[in-house]
Amino acid sequence: MMKLVRLFMAALLLVAATACGGSNQKKERALNAQNGKTLVVFFSHAGENYAVGNVKVGNTKVVANYISEITGADQFEIVCVKDYDMPYKPLCDLAKKEQQQGELPGFKGEVKNLDQYATVFIGGPVWWGTYPQVMFTFLEKYKKQLNDKTIVPFTTHEGSGLGNCVSDLKKILPKAQVKGEFSLYGHEVRESKARVQKWLQGLGYK
Ligand SMILES: Cc1cc2nc3c(=O)[nH]c(=O)nc-3n(C[C@H](O)[C@H](O)[C@H](O)COP(=O)(O)O)c2cc1C
């Protein structure tokens, strides 16, 4: 009889331990979606691009708009002071040169009250394996304030996925909680609102 009771107690403990572990994992995955405000920072290139033709709204901007629609997040669009209004091929050459030379081109405007945001989504196209150089200009400017936040990287791409974006972000923001990353093929974003919604739900947004 005692043996049976002990067996029952052991089973009970196991169930309790599994349940706790489960909820901890869930908490770990979820962001502080309910705590504090969310900002979406993104760069996106409208015009001629690979696989989509000539678009009025860039692929990453489409995703950034879904995020704001679904979560109510504010936005800051990184707009480069340089003129990127050119066809795909010359833009590829220019972007490669910028990266090789470690150029940090300027951007327009500034983020107001960055301190009010607990979570910052950071998104852009993958250009030669990582974010466009102008996004690194942004990160260099705001790294001190971004370092104590939750950072959620996202990309649009045509094969590289997240590329080196997450590891590059972690290098610049070693103290930030960089997690919850997501990527989409650029040519699929316009039919992918439901996928974005699912990702955000997984992060704890309603
Ligand atoms: C200059 C340039 C470089 C690119 N390099 C890559 C790359 O390395 N890997 C990749 O998968 N896609 C690459 N692409 C494709 C873009 O990442 C993809 O089209 C993206 O969705 C564009 O987003 P946007 O419209 O928001 O700018 C490149 C596109 C351009 C214009």
Image: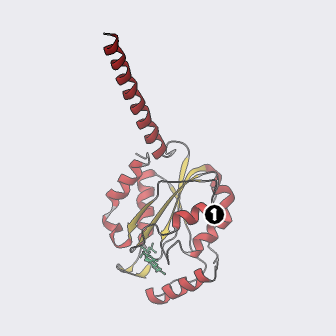
How many numbered circles are shown?
Answer: 1
The answer to whether residue 96 of the structure is visible from this angle is yes
In the image, ligand 1 is in what quadrant?
bottom left
Residue at disc 1, secondary structure: helix
- Quadrant location of residue 19? top left
Q: Residue at x 35, y 79 (%)?
A: 51
Above or below, 50 against 14 in this view is below
Percent of width and height locating residue 46: 45, 77
Residue 29: percent from left, percent from top: 46, 46
Q: Of 77 and 102, which appears nearest the observer? A: 102
Per the image, the residue denoted by label 1 is 172
Is residue 30 visible to the viewer in this orientation of the structure? no
Q: Quadrant of the C terminus?
A: top left
Identify the residue at image location x=38%, y=22%.
Answer: 10
Q: Where is residue 167 in the image (x, y as percent from the top left)?
A: 55, 64
**Residue shown at 47% from the left, 69% from the top:** 163
Apparent side of residue 106 relative to residue 7 in the rendered image (left or right): right
Left or right placement of residue 31 versus residue 189 in this view: right
Residue type marked 1: Ile
From what the image shows, is residue 131 above or below residue 1? below
